[in-house]
Amino acid sequence: MSLHVFGIRHHGPGCARSLRDALEALQPDIVLVEGPPDAQDVLPLLQQKEMKPPVALLIYAPEQPKQAVYYPFTSFSPEWQAFQYAYKKQIPARFMDLPQAFQFARLHSEEEAPAPFTTNEPTDELPLSTSINEVAIAQPTEQEAQQNHEHDPLALLAEAAGYEDHELWWELQIEQRQNTAHLFEAILEAMTALRGDKPPKDEEEALREAYMRQTIRAAQKEGFQRIAIVCGAWHAPVLTNPGPAKADAALLSGLKRSKVEATWIPWTNSRLSHRSGYGAGVTSPGWYEHLWTTPKQTTIRWMTKAAHLLRKQDLDASSASVIEAVRLAEALAALRDLTRPGLSDLHEAIETILCHGNTEPMQLIREKLEIGEKLGKVPSEAPMVPLQRDLEIQQRKLKLKPSPEEAPLALDLRKENDLARSRLLHRLALLNLNWGKLQRNRIQGSTFHEDWKLEWKVEFVIALIEANIWGNTIEIAASNFVKHEAESAQELPTLTKLLDKTMLAELPAAIDHLLEQIQERAAISADVRHLMDALPPLARVARYGNVRQSKSEQILPIIDGLFERVIISLPIACANLDDDAARQMLSSIDAVQECVSLLNDTEQRKQWQQTLRKLMERESIHGLLRGRCCRLLLEQQVLEDEELQRQTSLALSSAVESTQAAAWIEGVLSGSGLLVIHQDALWIALDRWLCTLSTEQFEALLPVLRRSFASFQSPERRKMGEKVKHLHTVSSSDKITATGTATLNTERAAKVLPLLASIVGGK
């Protein structure tokens, strides 16, 4: 009976290739792999042809789906190759790490969020698991990286070999290695020297190693003669001789279990990299996959891939340049006393030759080549919650294939399939699963087109598992979730915004429930701003409801009731507001204007314009609001030139406080600049008012004035400058005054009087 321990580093083509060769030479009768025994039941799915890496094991607590851990695998993961070998030879293969059921129970008792077992592990093995919370975390800080470096055995070995970059040392010694003989013996010897007689650094590591030894002892008791043990290199020294079981059994006794479930999910290359925040990943999964699939002519083929990628972006990358880049990479490696070019050598050559020294294309190389976006696939037999299964069925039916790459999707809602696609994406968005992001409509004014950007993310699986509590289908789950949100909503605008989204998702039961809630909440709401902010979503539903075949007639009475209350309450609500309150009220006034514009009801528009006139003319109203009301009336072409001139004169008169006058200017100028450019009376009044300001007043008001003009486009500001310049342009022959009358040149007029007299017959 013999034990053979293979210390590996997760995600490494050199390790994977060496392990495969070592297993072929050993011919073991069982393979034990560091990993979660909770997933033992789904492990046979690796044999399915549909299983295409990268994939990940997902272990989660069904009662708390956010308490979950990922175990990513790809084709160049040593563990993946170990399992493939075992199934090919038809020998048992088992996970042997401490089950996540124990870990979840420990964390729950400590009231902590889930974390990977190997949070504090040395990076020699780049540990296997990562928690759901880690998927979105940022890169470690420089100080943290330095601390990790101090405790990183790889760094110590690399420095002993004369390398400052331990990743480069590992890549050259392991990942690009062709001769695999005695590799694992050397790793075991190095790790034994590094660990020495030190005990496990914490309880977590002690529990894990104790459980692994117990699993090894169980395999020995079953009579297996050649046991292959695949584990992180750091653990290798303590697994070569399990020893007596008493101490390990005592350490593991009394551990509580939580209920967990396991499944396989698709994974992506970007999630294998450090870019995703997965600290146990590799910085360059695309490069490692290249090393795995093309062990020969690695440099030439990498350069060729880079050239193809650049050509797709219409960048020049000739064959001659590829040859020159290969030669440069090999020369750089020789200068650095390397046997073959590493990734840094290749990138220096690409940037110098193929990118002509420009750094911008190197980001493309990094994203598309060095990392790559490859989405794995799992068999249909993999366990799924009903909601996940329903989504998969709809994806196939609607021909919406998940992809990690951002892709545009244009929908014509007059087509049945496109309408169904839109409906699905809106329902998923209600469940906080934003597979698609709705873009600005490319066809202005169209109600039949939607533009989306789709990007599938692996963490959506967790969102689906979590959302399954609301129902077993996307429609039912979204409807129940909306009802729940409606019950807990505290403000009327929240309800109407939710109704807008629900209408787009076409959920009849949820819509009826929302309408009831809106009517009840509107009847008791006393905040006029809440009433105003609630109008635009309702107006959009009423205006575009015919596209979705929704009952928009149910919404119009609600809009009418809210609108009448707004008309009555608004003048009082606008009186005596400070600057902040006025700015908030301005957004609410714009909301009502949007509602009126969308519905285009003649009577409603007339009432709204009358209200705007009242606000515009009241001196007790804040200047910002009066200016905005003036602007809205001007846009609707119901404000005559004389009235505009009168309002401008009143708002900018010397009797008005300068700050209020500046606020009025900001209100009247907000919006498109083309409309106000042609208002001569407005510009003349503005010019006069500015000339009356003292230096101190002008400096105090300058931020407000600059803000007023900042929203205009450059061509608009240029035309405004020309307009102001024209106001001060005086011709000797045609001088124009501020009142618009010509100055008479009597001397020149006297010269023509005799001629005019003879023409008309005068004397």
Image (spheres, rainbow, N blue to C red):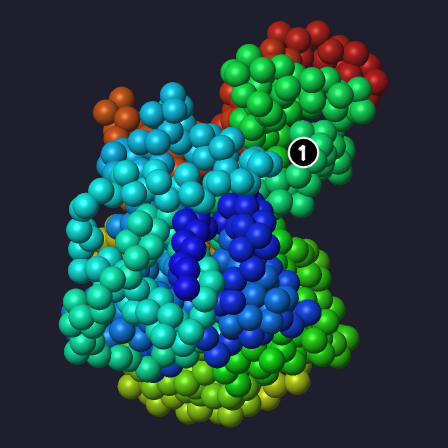
Residue 49 in view here = yes
Where residue 47 sits, quadrant-wise, is: bottom right
Name the quarter where the N terminus is drawn.
bottom left
Instruction: Find numbered disc 1 in the image and state the secondary structure of the residue it sits on.
Output: helix
The crowd level at tag 1 (other Cα within 10 Å; few <14, some 14-19, many 20+) is some
Percent position (x, y) of residue 730? Answer: 56, 16
Q: 45 left or right of 447?
A: left
Where residue 659 sits, quadrant-wise, is: top left
Residue located at (69% from left, 20% from top): 325
Q: 327 left or right of 160?
A: right
Residue located at (28% from left, 26% from top): 699
Q: In the image, is residue 249 above or below residue 16?
A: below
Residue at numbered disc 1: 298
Residue located at (33% from left, 69% from top): 217
Residue 648 in view here = no
Q: 122 left or right of 509?
A: left
Percent position (x, y) of residue 134? Answer: 36, 56
